[in-house]
Amino acid sequence: MKLVLHNTLSGEREPFVPIDPNGKRVTFYSCGPTVYDYAHIGNFRSFLNADILRRTLELLGFEVVHIMNITDVGHMTDDSVADGGGEDKMEVAAKRLTEAKKSGALPEGADIDPSDPMAVADFYADAFLKDAQTLGLKVALEASSHPDRLPRPTQYVQGMIDMVASLIDRGHAYQADDGVVYFDVSSWPDYGELSGNTVDALRSGQGGRVSMDTQSIKRHPADFMLWKPDSDHLMRWPSPWGEGYPGWHLECSVMAGTLLGEEIDLHSGGEDNIFPHHECEIAQSRGTTGCGVFSRYWFHTRHLMVDGGKMSKSSGTFFTIRDLLERGASPAAIRLELVRTHYRLNSNFTMQGLRDAQRQVERLSRVAAWLEKHADSAVDEVGPLRSAIEPFTAALCDDLNVAGALGVLNSAIGELDLESNPTIGAGPLTWSDELAALRSMDSVFGVLDLDVAPPAGADDDVAAIESLIEARNLARDNKDWARADEIRDELLQAGIAIKDGAGGTAWERVLQ
């Protein structure tokens, strides 16, 4: 089957054809986190969709070389302005943690000098790596064997300086009166090819945002910063244009070119990266290399909302992965919930949706356990899971229709008789074939290799729970309704919901 993807560059769905003449190797670059704080679930939705794309390619037989940057310099607080606005996010983080240290409110484990931006970057980079590994991102899981798959811009500053010099030599960049080196968008007729923001529209202010503070200095309002001399900046390096720091857009062009080549197959990020970041990347990269293409395919994930609105700390709808784990969610459920909605649709995260995802992964886990138990038992015909592989793959090849693929898998599971107790026989096939099919399909979802059960902090003692339920039932028998309600509330506070029925009282863990 051939994978068809929506390509932001063309605005159309296109069959995926790799650069590799042998048709096997795929080069893939993803914009990763800026490590000035913990990554939130909106960030991880983009990272996980890139992981699903990679896993789908591997299911189809491709060998994927996947790079994800970890930004530790140059990303400004107002990154919607093409040449950056506000403060460097790493400098902001250093100030924030310095104040936190004074009040004794440093994050747990942050035994660092908070005024040192590199120490701050190292702390949050380690936190991101742990979260990413917890959720099964392959690029993070292979970090120990391939550390260059998670590069950091501060390790590539010389390459950025070289790119700036090359762009100046080629007539695509200049040093302005304020000493800042800018990319000259008027020298690049294709500027706007990704986002649709034409140079004329940007000049009139009708396109993406431009910096108003530097318009009188720059040749064009949309010219974006490549290097800024700043001897007071916390993070700075010597350069031909003065001691200072690189523009945010430079980092991905340099690291992608260095680690993957001048032309790559795939580039991913959130939709907010399209302009200005990815637009600027294309201009820089092509302006340096002279190639007609920087990345053949551009893959962008839309925004994540929480309870129908933007994430907000003040309203209690801002979540990190750690927040959800503390509330009793399993890593597998978090992963599934963040990828179930199509990447080109806005996704609405709710706690009920997370509970539904928890039930889904528990069902998959039960099926896998049953198949492992009966792996050697014979069957006479191909089972529903093996039959599902083709339609499952076809759904994924349809622009990563994850919901469709999950529907195929659920239908196949529904055809299994998990109440039976097969015995070893003489059939031509065994249940191990069904288990292999399930594992093959889950290689894309990536949940069975994670912790499917709620974390240890939410794993109450079963005997204690059942003892409380027994005490509640006794109170009900004695018509002590107040005590029965008290026990019910005590269980609910501990994350245990109960339901009375004809067969007795059932209970389940719920997210708090």
Image: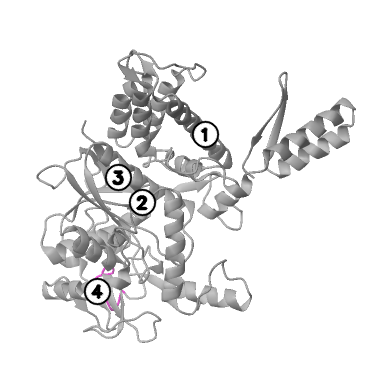
Measuring from the top left, give residue 412's x and y in whole percent.
Answer: 40, 22
The residue sitting at 29% across, 47% down in the picture is 299
Q: Residues within 10 Å of mark 3 (few under 14, many from 20)?
A: many
Does 221 appear in magenta?
Answer: yes
The residue carrying mark 4 is: 182
Q: Residues within 10 Å of mark 1 (few under 14, many from 20)?
A: some
Disc number for residue 271: 2
The three-letter amino acid code for the residue at tag 4 is: Tyr
Disc number for residue 362: 1
The residue carrying mark 3 is: 54
Nearer to us of marks 2 and 1 is: 1
The answer for how far apart the CA atoms under marks 1 and 3 are is 24 Å
Measuring from the top left, give residue 337's x and y in whole percent.
Answer: 48, 40
Instruction: Locate residue 449: give its quadrant.
Output: top left
The answer for how far apart the CA atoms under marks 2 and 3 are is 18 Å
Q: Residues within 10 Å of mark 4 (few under 14, many from 20)?
A: many
Instruction: Locate residue 217: give its quadrant.
Output: bottom left
Q: Residues within 10 Å of mark 2 (few under 14, many from 20)?
A: some
